[in-house]
Image (tube, rainbow, N blue to C red):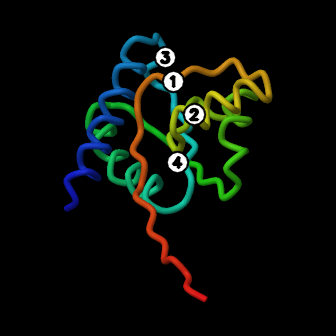
């Protein structure tokens, strides 16, 4: 298993666990927004780990990158895990969301090929 994947999954489990344990609603199902691909796979890996600690999450996948923050702002999700800090900051600035980062996320490497003419 990829070390970065495992580290990210473990970090997310710790963050969610901390948030849940500091709240009074232990029986709640926490809805987490993600984007398809690696973020969704991380949540699928984390979900049974959190369940062992008595924390249930429901993973909600969004293909539109603007929607997870809107859904958290509207109360449809409890949290999301898909973005880097500059994206969140821009969304908060542009739309006036009352959202804050509670942890860090990974940024996947991107590859591209230079085209020669």
Mark with earlier residue (2, 1): 2
Mark with earlier residue (4, 1): 4
* Residue 6 numbered tag: none
Q: Are marks 4 and 1 in contact (CB under 8 Å)?
A: no
- Of 38 and 45, nearer the camera is 38
The residue that mark 3 highlights is 25
The residue that mark 4 highlights is 59
Q: Badge 2: how crowded within 10 Å, few (<14), some, or many (20+)?
A: few
Left or right: residue 98 versus residue 10 is right
Residue 105 image-quadrant placement = top left
Gap between marks 3 and 4 measured at Cα: 18 Å
Q: Badge 1: how crowded within 10 Å, few (<14), some, or many (20+)?
A: some
Q: Position of residue 109 (x, y in %)?
A: 40, 58
Q: In the image, which is nearer the foreground, mark 1 or mark 3? A: 1
Secondary structure under tag 1 reads loop
Mark with earlier residue (2, 3): 3
Gap between marks 4 and 2 measured at Cα: 23 Å
Residue 103 image-quadrant placement = top left
The residue that mark 1 highlights is 101
What residue do we see at 57% from left, 20% from top? Answer: 100
Gap between marks 2 and 1 measured at Cα: 11 Å
Mark with earlier residue (4, 2): 4
* Residue 86 numbered tag: 2
Q: In the image, which is nearer the foreground, mark 3 or mark 4? A: 4
Gap between marks 1 and 3 measured at Cα: 21 Å
Q: Residue furthest bottom?
A: 117
Q: Position of residue 115 (x, y in %)?
A: 56, 82
Q: In the image, which is nearer the foreground, mark 4 or mark 2? A: 2
Q: Position of residue 101 (x, y in %)?
A: 51, 24
Gap between marks 4 and 1 measured at Cα: 18 Å
């Amino acid at each position: 298993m990829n070390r970065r994947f495992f580290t990210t999954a473990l970090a997310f489990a710790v963050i969610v666990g901390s948030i849940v344990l500091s709240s009074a609603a232990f029986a709640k199902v926490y809805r987490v927004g993600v984007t398809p691909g690696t973020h969704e796979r991380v949540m699928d890996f984390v979900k049974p780990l959190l369940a062992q600690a008595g924390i249930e999450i429901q993973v909600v996948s969004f293909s539109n990158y603007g929607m997870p923050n809107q859904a958290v702002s509207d109360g449809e999700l409890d949290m999301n895990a898909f973005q880097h800090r500059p994206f969140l900051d821009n969304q908060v600035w542009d739309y006036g969301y009352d959202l804050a980062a509670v942890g860090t996320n990974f940024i996947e490497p991107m590859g591209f090929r230079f085209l020669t003419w």
